[in-house]
Amino acid sequence: MAERDRPIAVLGAGSWGTALAIQYARAGRPTRLWARDAAHVARMQRARCNQDYLPGAAFPDLLTVVEDLPVALGEDADALVSVPSHALRSMFTLLAGQGRAPRRVAWATKGFEQASGLLPHQVAAEVFGADLPMAVLSGPTFASEVAAGLPTAMVVAARESDFAVSLAQSISGENFRAYLSSDLVGVEVGGAVKNALAIGAGISDGLGYGSNTRIALITRGLSEMTRLGVALGGQKDTFMGLAGMGDLVLTCTDDQSRNRRLGLALAQGQRVEEAQASIGQVVEGVLAARAVRDVAMRHGVDMPIVEQIFRVIHEGAEPRSAVSALMGRRLKAEDGESMSAWSQSVD
């Protein structure tokens, strides 16, 4: 069977899982979209669209909506998991309990596991074993634009090149282009950190601090992301690409980002719980701020912007005081050296 003809089971029918299922089917790959909620599945089957999370995006003919997980997986389907980060391990465990592991597993989930600080591929290795081919899909993508067929680029990262090529080729089409990477760590760190930083960008803009502040936050945030990623074994160049800088800029600057919108709400005085309720979907950056901060502290990585975002979200710090704390830090060279070391090298 040709890889493009092999079914793919997209597990999780939120906005992003639905958009990925639409794109795979649009590009010509038989696609099965699965959700836990039987009523949700029935509504999608009747309407041939996901009115709950992605209204107006019609399902292609090659997209089938199923309620039964064994039916979704079939005998030879690849599994693509698209659930919030806090539900990733339970979804992997559900998959592993089906009697036989899927042939290959990918995910489009972004974020460290809260309790353990593990990246998604490390969670997958614990559940399935390290030998199962695995991959991650990430990059600067909004679900509504993917579903609408607007030109989009993203990254598929896997250590097994055949799997990466298969996933990339079968999702790519006239208006969608997937690039390949072998850097699972770098791609996953980028996806985790950018969500927290986007809340910070929303706070900054909500306080009226302007474009200078926003670009400083993005640029220095990218530096923090890179430091953490390299410390965890990622490749520095990854953070200058789609899964690093690309995803960070998108999420920090466009109000389609739930993380950015939460930051805007916090700047206007809303509590975190109120802001999340008004958005109506999971805001990954809330948990990400804590997880990223904890991992950075464990590895001795300096992330002052993430630290202040954490303090605002989880310790009730006043947003303006967080900005003042950042601006009042001692001066240093852009590459991280102290000013005294820099001046001595000039002398």
Image (cartoon, rainbow, N blue to C red):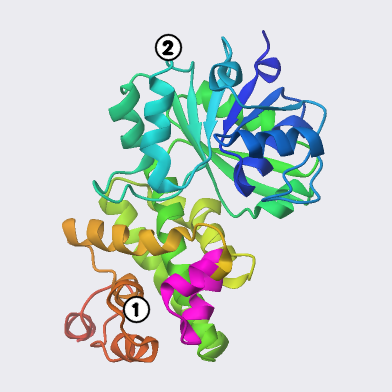
**Residue type pointed to by label 1:** Val
Which region of the structure is painted magenta? 258-277
Q: Residue furthest front?
A: 39
Question: Counting residues from the N terminus, which is met first, the one under dot 2 or under dot 1?
Answer: 2
Q: Residue at x 30, y 62 (%)?
A: 290
**Residue type pointed to by label 2:** Arg
Front residue of 316 and 159:
316
Q: Quadrant of residue 284?
A: bottom left
Q: Where is residue 191 drawn, in percent x and y?
A: 46, 53
- Mark 2 lies on a secondary structure that is loop
Question: To which residue does mark 2 refer?
Answer: 100
Quadrant housing the C terminus:
bottom left
Front residue of 284 and 170:
284
Query: Count of labels shown?
Result: 2
Quadrant housing the N terminus:
top right
- Height in image: 146 above or below 96? below
Q: Is residue 218 visible?
A: no
In the rendered structure, the answer to whether residue 236 lies left or right of residue 171 reads: left
Q: Is residue 323 visible?
A: yes
In the rendered structure, the answer to whether residue 225 lies left or right of residue 12 reads: left
Q: Where is residue 309 drawn, in percent x and y?
A: 36, 74
Q: Where is residue 45 drawn, in percent x and y?
A: 75, 32
Question: To which residue does mark 1 refer?
Answer: 312
- Mark 1 lies on a secondary structure that is helix
Q: Residue at x 39, y 51 (%)?
A: 189
Front residue of 271 and 220:
271
User: Badge 1 local density, few (<14 within 10 Å), some, or many (20+)?
Assistant: many
User: Badge 2 local density, few (<14 within 10 Å), some, or many (20+)?
Assistant: few
Judged by its main secondary structure, the magenta piece is helix
